[in-house]
Image: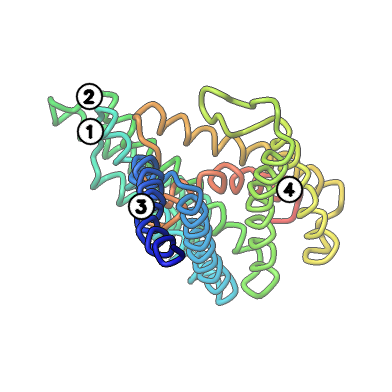
C-alpha cells in the first residue's frame, strides 16, 4: 500500500512542476511588452546608471580639456573657443535648415572662426571689423543670389554673432592677465555659470513646484531658478574673496545676479530655437549632453554679461 502511495506521489510531481512552469511562463509573457520597451524596473535602473556614467565621463573630459587650455595660456584658450564656436555655429545652422532656412555656411562659419581670433589679436577693434566684413559679405550674397531670402541672410549673420561673438567674451576675460590670474578669472566666470546650472537642477528636482517657462522648457522651475541664482552669487563671492582681490564684494554680488539671469535666458533662448525647429538636441557630439550648443547655451549670454560687468567695473 505504501509503495502505491509513493508511486502515486511520483506521478503527481511532474503535474505540479508543469503548473509552476506554466505560471512562470505566463508571468514572463505578461512582461514581454514592457521588456521590449525597456520599461522593466531593472532595465530602467541600468539605463539610468549608464546615462549617468556616460554624462559624467564626457562632462569630466570636457572640464579637463577646458581647464588645461585656460591655464596653458590665452592662445590655447583662443584655439579652444574658436573650435567650440565653429561647432556651435554649425549646429545652429543645422537647426535653421531643419526649420526651413538656408544659411550661407561658408560666410557664417568663417566668421565663427574669426571672432575668437580677433578677440585675441586686437580686442574690440578687430571684432568690429569682423562684424563689418560679415554683414558686407551677407549683403553682397543677397544682392547677387536671387534664390536667397532675407530670412536666410538674417540667420547667416545671426549665427556667428550669437555663437562665436558671444563666446569670444571668454577670450577677452582670459586676456585680463596672461598668467594664472587671467585663467582664474575666466575659470571663475565659467564656474559661476556651471554652478548656476547645477544648483538650478538640484533645487528644482528637490522642491520645484512652479514652472518657469512651461511652453519652452517644462523641466525648469521658479524654485530652481532662484537656487541657480544663489549658486551663481556664491561662486562670485568666492572669486572675490580668494581668486581676484581687485573684485570687490558688491560688484561680485552684482555679477552673480546678472550673470545668473543671463545664463538662464541663454538656456531658454536655445530651447526656444530647438522647439521651433522640432528638435530635441542641437547635435550628438557630447555623449549624454547632446550637442556642443546644448552644453554652451548658458555660457554665451552669461559670458557676455560677465565681460561687460567686469569691464564697466574696472577689472578688465
Task: List the residue tagged with mark 4.
Answer: 232
Kindly identify which numbered label has been placed on residue 15: 3
Q: Residue at x 61, y 33 (%)?
A: 220
| Mark sitting earlier along the chain (3/2) | 3
Q: Residue at x 37, y 53 (%)?
A: 21
Q: Position of residue 190 (x, y in %)?
A: 63, 56
| Mark sitting earlier along the chain (1/4) | 1
Q: Alpha-carbon neighbours of circle 2 within 10 Å: few (<14), some, or many (≥20)? A: few
Q: Alpha-carbon neighbours of circle 4 within 10 Å: few (<14), some, or many (≥20)? A: many
| Mark sitting earlier along the chain (4/2) | 2
Closer to the camera in the image, 120 or 223: 223
- Marks 4, 2: nearer the viewer: 4
Q: As displayed, is residue 308 above or below residue 188?
A: above
Task: List the residue tagged with mark 2.
Answer: 149
Say whether residue 126 is left or right of residue 22. Answer: right
Q: Residue at x 36, y 43 (%)?
A: 26
Amino acid at each position: 500500500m505504501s509503495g502505491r502511495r509513493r508511486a502515486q506521489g511520483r506521478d503527481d510531481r511532474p503535474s505540479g512542476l508543469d503548473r509552476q512552469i506554466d505560471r512562470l511562463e505566463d508571468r514572463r509573457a505578461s512582461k514581454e511588452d514592457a521588456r521590449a520597451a525597456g520599461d522593466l524596473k531593472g532595465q530602467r535602473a541600468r539605463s539610468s546608471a549608464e546615462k549617468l556614467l556616460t554624462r559624467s565621463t564626457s562632462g569630466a573630459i570636457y572640464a579637463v580639456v577646458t581647464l588645461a587650455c585656460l591655464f596653458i595660456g590665452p592662445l590655447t584658450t583662443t584655439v579652444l573657443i574658436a573650435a567650440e564656436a565653429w561647432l556651435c555655429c554649425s549646429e545652429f545652422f543645422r537647426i535653421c535648415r531643419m526649420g526651413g532656412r538656408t544659411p550661407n555656411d561658408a560666410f557664417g562659419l568663417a566668421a565663427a572662426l574669426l571672432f575668437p581670433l580677433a578677440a585675441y589679436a586686437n580686442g574690440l577693434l578687430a571684432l568690429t571689423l569682423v562684424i563689418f566684413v560679415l554683414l558686407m559679405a551677407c549683403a553682397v550674397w543677397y544682392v547677387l543670389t536671387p534664390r536667397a531670402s532675407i530670412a536666410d541672410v538674417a540667420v547667416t549673420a545671426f549665427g556667428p554673432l550669437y555663437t562665436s561673438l558671444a563666446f569670444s567674451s571668454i577670450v577677452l576675460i582670459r586676456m585680463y592677465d596672461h598668467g594664472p590670474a587671467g585663467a582664474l578669472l575666466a575659470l571663475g566666470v565659467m564656474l559661476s555659470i556651471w554652478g548656476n546650472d547645477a544648483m538650478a537642477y538640484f533645487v528644482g528636482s528637490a522642491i520645484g513646484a512652479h514652472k518657469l517657462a512651461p511652453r519652452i522648457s517644462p523641466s525648469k522651475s521658479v524654485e530652481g531658478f532662484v537656487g541657480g541664482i544663489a549658486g551663481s552669487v556664491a561662486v562670485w563671492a568666492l572669486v572675490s574673496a580668494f581668486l581676484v582681490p581687485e573684485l570687490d564684494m558688491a560688484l561680485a554680488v552684482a555679477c552673480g545676479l546678472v550673470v545668473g539671469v543671463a545664463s538662464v535666458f541663454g538656456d531658454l533662448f536655445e530651447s526656444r530655437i530647438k522647439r521651433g525647429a522640432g528638435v530635441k538636441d542641437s547635435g550628438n557630439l557630447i555623449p549624454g549632453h547632446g550637442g556642443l550648443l546644448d552644453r554652451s547655451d548658458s555660457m554665451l549670454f552669461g559670458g557676455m554679461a560677465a565681460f561687460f560687468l567686469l569691464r564697466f567695473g574696472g577689472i578688465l
